[in-house]
Amino acid sequence: MPITNKLRSYQTAIGAAILDSILHRKGLTFSVEIARQGGKNELSAQIEVLLLTLFAARGGNGVKGAPTFKPQTIISMQRLRERLNDAGFSDFWVSEHGYIIRLGRARQLFLSADRSSHVVGATAHILLEIDEAQDVAKDKFAKEFKPMGAATNVTTVLYGTPWDDSTLLEETKQVNLELERKDGIRRHFSYDWQEVAKHNPDYLAYVEGERQRLGESHPLFLTQYCLRPLAGGGGFLSGSQRAQLQGSHARRRRPSGGKQAFVAGIDIAGQAEEGEDAALRALKPRQDSTVVTIGGLDYSVCDAVVRQPRLLIVEHRWWTGKPHASLYPQLLDVLKNVWGCSRVVVDSTGVGQGVASFLESSLGKSAVVPFQFTQSSKSKLGFGLLAAVNAGRVKMYSADGSPEYQQFWWEMEHARSAYRPNQTVNFFVDPAEGHDDFLMSLALAVEAAQGYEPRRAKGHVREADM
């Protein structure tokens, strides 16, 4: 049974293999990796239309699971409805119970694969699909979804893009590759962005822009477009990335004049370590500190693809063991009177709320952005920092022999990364080794630079002027 000619050649190859397994009752399990926006969801919907048509008289269920019901499962249902309408079935398909689409006696069920969902009891007679399988827990799939097709030896398809080497999708892929070596039956299909771009010039332009914005070594570019799984974490910044981070401009204690825009990122020390003398830094180098990273914005590097300025780090201020209340006037003076910072992103997690509130009331809500550290927000912060480093959009001042310079680079060298499900990353310095105050302050400063919109577009800040 041919697949519609609206699909591209790599999609039809996948569809033909899946249909062959269904129609000949082979019960194969396929792993399908297509670069982001390369058409895997369209392929899935087209297959579902064809199967509903073929089994409309005979009956049976297809089952599709996704990491969340809203929005992922809902989007899949909407796409199937649209394709059924395109195929002329607008007056024939019926929606049932909010998660089933029926054509004749055949049904397509859409279920959430979130850990909290309850899906035991459904049966997959025709096809079992798992969308974004890299984000579905292995035990959830094994205990609740895989048994749905046990009585029918159902064909199973896991769609997605790689993440790390421990996901359901990656483990299924490795099993499939081993089976392929033994019997020659193709079970794994992988088409990266370059393959997709052969069929779509607009897609080529878009991904080239993403490569320029993120950098080729960025975890999201590697996984979503190159289809290369991450190796379970390790160093957050490679040697080459640290080399990119090093700038040639001198550290400054105050602005040099001119219409320069400055931003700041502030990592706040934990209250539990306050009240101790600042001299304890020498005796307790791992003690938590409040760190301010100040940078000037260079708009000469902006282009049509990457519209963000370069952040040139020009100053660090560092306090250890100093109570937050006693920091307020000094922080305000540094940010407002010395540097005139246009945008400040400050850690407002926990005890940082007090500092953030003070700065908001003193500098204005338009200039101060409180940042709450959560698993999701910290991940976005880390990805933003990696993108800025990879693209050369953040530079550290040249060596000046200061404790701040030495501590900054110690943290950059000791920073680690841990990749989590749902395309999130944690970045940190192992607490057993030390703190990551300069690392977090740097990431917050990059966030401040990315979110700042100048009031005027006249003039540039050049690295030589900083």
Image (cartoon, rainbow, N blue to C red):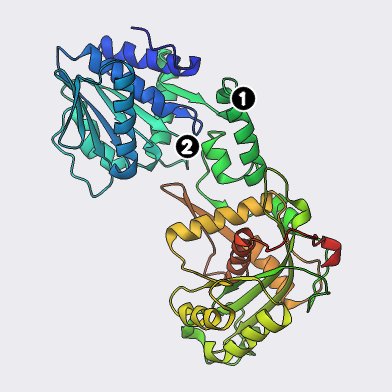
- Regarding residue 235, the answer to whether it shows in the image is no
Say what secondary structure mark 2 lies in: loop
Dot 1 corresponds to which residue?
A: 201
Residue at horizontal 52 percent and vertical 69 percent from the top: 431
Rendering coords of residue 241 (x, y %): 69, 52
- Number of numbered markers: 2
Residue at horizontal 61 percent and vertical 40 percent from the top: 210
User: Which mark is in front, 1 or 2?
Assistant: 1
Q: Report if the CB atoms under discs 1 and 2 are less than 8 Å apart.
A: no
Residue at horizontal 35 percent and vertical 17 percent from the top: 18
The residue lying toward the viewer, choosing from 313 and 152, is 313
Where 52 sits versus 267, above or below?
above
Where 310 sits versus 128, above or below?
below
Between discs 1 and 2, the one toward the N terminus? 2
Rendering coords of residue 405 (x, y %): 74, 71
Residue at horizontal 79 percent and vertical 75 percent from the top: 255
The kind of residue on which mark 2 rests is: Pro
Distance from disc 1 to disc 2, alpha carbons, whole Å, reads 24 Å
Picture disc at residue 162: 2
Where 93 sits versus 396, above or below?
above
Rendering coords of residue 71 (x, y %): 33, 43
* Left or right of 104, for residue 37: right
The residue lying toward the viewer, choosing from 78 and 326, is 78
The kind of residue on which mark 1 rests is: Pro
Q: For label 1, count other residues whose C-alpha is less than 10 Å away and answer few (under 14), some (14-19) or many (20+).
A: few
Where 136 sits versus 51, above or below?
below
On the image, which quarter does residue 461 sit in?
bottom right
* Left or right of 130, for residue 390: right
The residue lying toward the viewer, choosing from 445 and 455, is 455
Q: For label 2, count other residues whose C-alpha is less than 10 Å away and answer few (under 14), some (14-19) or many (20+).
A: many
